[in-house]
Every structure is written in structure tokens, then in C-alpha cells.
Amino acid sequence: MSNNSDSGGLVVVIVLTIAAWGLSAGWFYQTGQQWFDTCWASINSKNPATTAAEATAWEQCGPQTQKALFDAGYVFGGNPEYAVSPELKAVNAACPNSFTEIPMSGVQVMAIDLLQKDGGPRWLDKFMPPDQMIVRTFNKGWPNCSAVRAANGFPKIVQKPDGTFGWSRPCQPCEAEKAAMGK
């Protein structure tokens, strides 16, 4: 009986080892470390992608970053000089600003920069999908963005079937902002 339990324990250890290695190798999904390495290369390369797989991976950096942030409840503020309504002013104060903070080349550039300043991916990011790592990094600079968005009536931004992002429902504060701007 002891022999069977010893070999059963060995099988469990082997299976767990293979599973851990498979997770870190990205067999099941792209890991945070893989996302970081791929997106860092896409931003810092002086040359175009050399393979179709590399080009495809580079193209996913922006949408993956946006999806992670939008799924976490983030919105991006705009030009604070033009904010009229209290709702938009609150979001501008609590969230990353697309007018002054997010590079024109995309929010993924900002994510990579923030991650580098934070020391890069953590050990667990070698096994986990990139979303948590991206959100964790943005939460350091804008910890209340999602809560302020919700408290001020802005709906979440979701990915549409065509791959674009938009409001999950009509944006009432946006309409109030348009009306306030007209006054």
C-alpha cells in the first residue's frame, strides 16, 4: 500500500510540475511576462516584426491593455480645461488622462513604462494572464478611477463584437456634459 501511495504522490508532483511549466510557457494563455516582453519589444524595436506571429502579437498589445483596464472599470479623462460638469471633472481628477498622460501611440506604451518604473513583472506574472499585472500597475497611480467612474454615473466601457470599445449603455454624464457645454 505504501508503494502505491508513493507512486501516486510522485505522479501528482510530476503533473503539477508539467502544469506549472506549461503555464509559464504560455501553453494555455499569454502570461503577464510574455505580454510584457512582447509589448516591450514592439515599442522598442527599430525594425518591423520579422514573422507573422510576432506581428500578430505586437498588434494585440494595445487592445489587450485597453480590455484589461476597461474590464477593471477604468475610463480615460480628456482635456481638463474643457470639463464643465462635476461628473467629468471628478473622472478627470481620478483617472488617467488621454489628453496629457496617455501617449498618442497607445495606452500600452504607458503600461510598459509604468511597469518598468515599478521594476517589471513580478514572479507570479510568469504564470498569470497580463490583465491583473496591467491593472495592478495602473491602480498605483489611479486607485480610485473605477469607483469614481461608477459613482458619477459613467457606464463601463466594453469590447464590442467588431473589436472596438464603447459604452456598455448610454452615457448619461456624457449627455449632461454636452448640455452643460452648450450653455
Image (cartoon, rainbow, N blue to C red):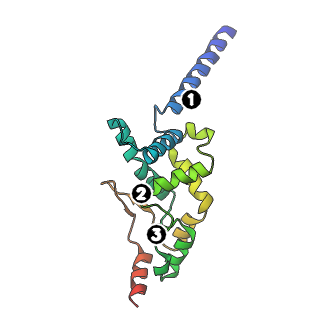
**Of 59 and 28, the residue lying toward us:** 59
Q: Are marks 2 and 1 in contact (CB under 8 Å)?
A: no
Q: Which residue is mark 1?
A: 20
In this view, 162 is above or below 180: above
Q: Earlier in the sequence, mark 2 or mark 3?
A: 3
> Residue at horizontal 59%, vertical 45%?
120
Looking at the rendered image, the quarter that the N terminus falls into is top right
Residue carrying label 3: 99
Residue drawn at the location 39% of the way across and 47% of the way down: 60
How many neighbours does mark 2 have within 10 angstroms: few (below 14), some (14-19), or many (20 or more)? few
Comparing 22 with 54, the one in front is: 54
Is residue 57 in view from this perspective?
Answer: yes
Name the mark nearer the viewer: 2 or 1: 2
Q: Residue furthest bottom?
A: 183
- Percent coordinates x, y for residue 111 in the rendering: 52, 53
Marked residue nearer the N-terminal end (1 or 3): 1
Check disc 2 and report the residue beneath it: 105
Secondary structure under badge 1? helix
Residue 161 percent across, percent down from the top left = 32, 54
How many circles with numbers are drawn on the protein?
Answer: 3
Q: The disc labelled 3 sits on which kind of residue?
A: Phe
SS at circle 3: loop
Cβ atoms at labels 1 and 3 below 8 Å apart? no
Number of other residues with Cα within 10 Å of mark 1, as a class: few under 14, some 14 to 19, many 20 or more: some
Give the residue type that dot 2 points to: Ser
Question: Alpha-carbon distance for marks 2 and 1?
Answer: 35 Å
78 vs 3, nearest the viewer? 78
Using a 10 Å C-alpha cutoff, classify the residue at mark 3 as few (fewer than 14 neighbours), some (14 to 19) or many (20 or more): some
The answer to whether any part of residue 83 appears in the image is no
Q: Residue at x 66, y 8 (%)?
A: 3
